[in-house]
Image (spheres, coloured by chain):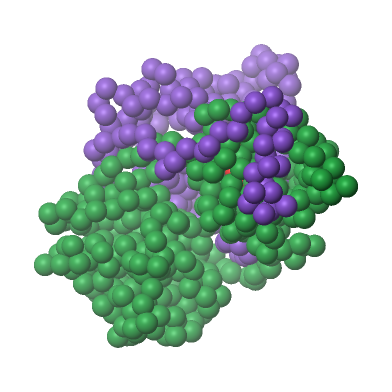
Amino acid sequence: MAKPILMLAEQVRGQLSDISFEMLGLGRRLADALGAPLSALVLGSEGAPLAARLGLADKALTAEDPRLNMAPPGTMADALRQVIEKEQAGLVLIGATNVCMGVGSILSARTGLPFVNNVRQAQAEEGAVRLTSQMYGGKILADVRLGGACGIAGIYPGAFPADAGRSDKAPPVEAAGVTVTAPKETFERYIEPETGDVDITKEKVLVAVGRGIQTQDNVGMAEELAAALGGAVCASRPVIDQGWLPLSRQVGKSGMNVKPRLYLALGISGAPEHWEGMQGSQCIIAVNTDAKAPIFDGAHYGIVGDALEFIPLLTDRLKARRG
Amino acid sequence: MNIFVLLRLAPDTVEELEIGGDGKSLDADILRFKPNDPDEHAVEEAVLLKEKHGGTVTVAALETPEVDDILYTALAKGADRAVKLTGDLGAAQSEAAARLLAGFLKAGGPALAPDTLILLRSQSIDDLEGEVGPYLAEALGLPYACVVTQVAPAGGAVKVTREFSGGLRGEFTLPLPAVLGIQSAEKPPRYVPIAKVRAAMKTARIETVDAGAVEQPARVGVERMYKPEAAGRAVMIEGAPEEVADKVVELLSKNSVI
Ligand SMILES: Cc1cc2nc3c(=O)[nH]c(=O)nc-3n(C[C@H](O)[C@H](O)[C@H](O)COP(=O)(O)OP(=O)(O)OC[C@H]3O[C@@H](n4cnc5c(N)ncnc54)[C@H](O)[C@@H]3O)c2cc1C
């Protein structure tokens, strides 16, 4: 029998993130194919009710210590290392998310296990696991084989279906018996998301601007278009970093996850970290000067052209329709 | 404060990428490199910290073609010292690169000066691990924070803000010395005119330090590299700009968005 598979459930203030179920579904599939048991680990206070929701695992482990809430990567890695030893785990699944960033590589440095990050596909094969890692901003895939199905995999958010990880059953829940060493990095406080004037996760129409928008004045032009569409403006990271829009308008890995009826992507290249936050949109129309921009591989409709020219043309037509 | 920033050139992914003859790596002949965006944020944060709180900024990089350019650019932006690590570096991946950099940082003695702050990118796009900072912090036995967007010195420590998700952030305090993976600087990276970079090339000197050889091979190797098949391809809306705008209005009204 193959060594047990261990997945690190991700919780943010008492809520399991989607990635937890994405990893659970994947872990179940690999465990069945390898004939290995699957354990899920929940770190942080109030872990038991969360662990009860991880029914696809053969057992769920908890480490209920407040110092493990949003813990620094070294502290999470230390808890995982102890559980790996106790359970004799082979394959370890961790979310390739901001919350768990750094955990995989610190764990790899401390245990000597190989670490493969940004995994988008995984298959069991003859006692081994083949992982496909996304590299070069999503432009290249690399296949890697973990012999003996031993190693650490950082699972890319959105790459595996979360529904495959949900179940009504509750798994047996045990305390993992982790000893927490006081972290060198002290957590001080949460900084709440800025509550802006609009909640972009609730808007039906989003006009999204990227670096291609070029200046803050042009963002105003996009605002006008959004108003004509009865929606709001959101943005990719570089626009937020420039300070042209508040953080509450950022879509993607560090920002919001949006699923509007229409997502109009203007001057956005379609990097995986942005894609992650808007892939669930019902209709994506992308405008980009570069015919090879990756956004066109995922958008429903594409326009190769200058967004700065397109925006006023569309705004005028929408205004004219309204009369 | 004694600030180090670790830099490198990154593959330019806007350019066409091709798989090399071995099927396991990119074709190095057509790969183009450019200054690494996240590194520019790390340099900016370092220079901002120096402007506010004093200290020195040292930028360091493993030797690769054209790496002098990014070192001189950092000097032109306000770094005080630039160091190039040479040796039998091969294609040092995250962990190996971290060991080489750790070796250089520790060269002054077993312990780093207590006011040392090491800044670098949060993520890399060209290896399997995708991050070098945690390996570096482990090799040096130092505290680490990643996805950092704000840094403020506080006595013998730094207060940092890091991003979680959905706009939620957290504040942490790390005792110095510490390693920080910078996500974005407090201000957009400054632009330096090429003339200033040229001036730095004339007046400043890049120190060269022998980093030895990569000791440890990667723990796992790539078996095959390939381009993803596009999940789908957008339906392209073509025509003169006015025509395209008309077609989009039609599409939106058909889908009852307007
Ligand atoms: C840990 C981490 C978290 C991250 N989180 C996020 C996140 O939450 N959200 C996010 O967006 N990014 C995030 N990123 C950054 C992400 O990797 C990309 O760098 C970013 O999404 C790129 O934004 P962009 O598409 O606007 O810019 P670019 O990639 O620079 O693309 C600009 C595009 O505009 C096009 N263009 C230029 N001029 C015009 C014009 N006149 N008309 C039309 N098109 C034009 C160009 O062809 C290009 O395709 C994160 C990165 C990391 C490492």
Q: Is residue B31 left or right of residue A228?
A: left
- Residue at 40 percent across and 31 percent down: it is B211
Please identify the quarter of the rendering in which residue B222 is found: top left
Q: Closest to the observer: A19 or B76?
A: A19
Q: Is residue A34 left or right of residue B193?
A: left
For the question of whether residue A98 can be seen, the reply is: yes
On screen, residue B131 above or below A85:
above
The spot of residue B198 in percent (x, y) is 68, 15
Query: On screen, B113 above or below A180?
Result: above
Q: Position of residue B191 (x, y in %)?
A: 72, 29
Residue furthest to the right in view is A323
Q: Is residue A111 left or right of residue A157?
A: left
| Residue at the (28%, 42%) spot, across then down | A143
Drawn colour of chain A? Answer: green
Reply above or below: B27 against A32: above
Visual hue assigned to chain B? purple
The structure residue drawn at horizontal position 55% and vertical position 21%, both measured from the top left corner, is B68
Q: Position of residue B202 (x, y in %)?
A: 66, 14
**Residue B178 location, quadrant:** bottom right
Task: Assign ligand 1 to one image quadrant.
Answer: top right
**Residue displayed at 71% across by 35% down:** B245
Q: Quadrant of residue B205?
A: top right
> Can residue B103 be seen?
no
Residue A267, percent from left and from top: 65, 36
B135 shown above or below A10: above
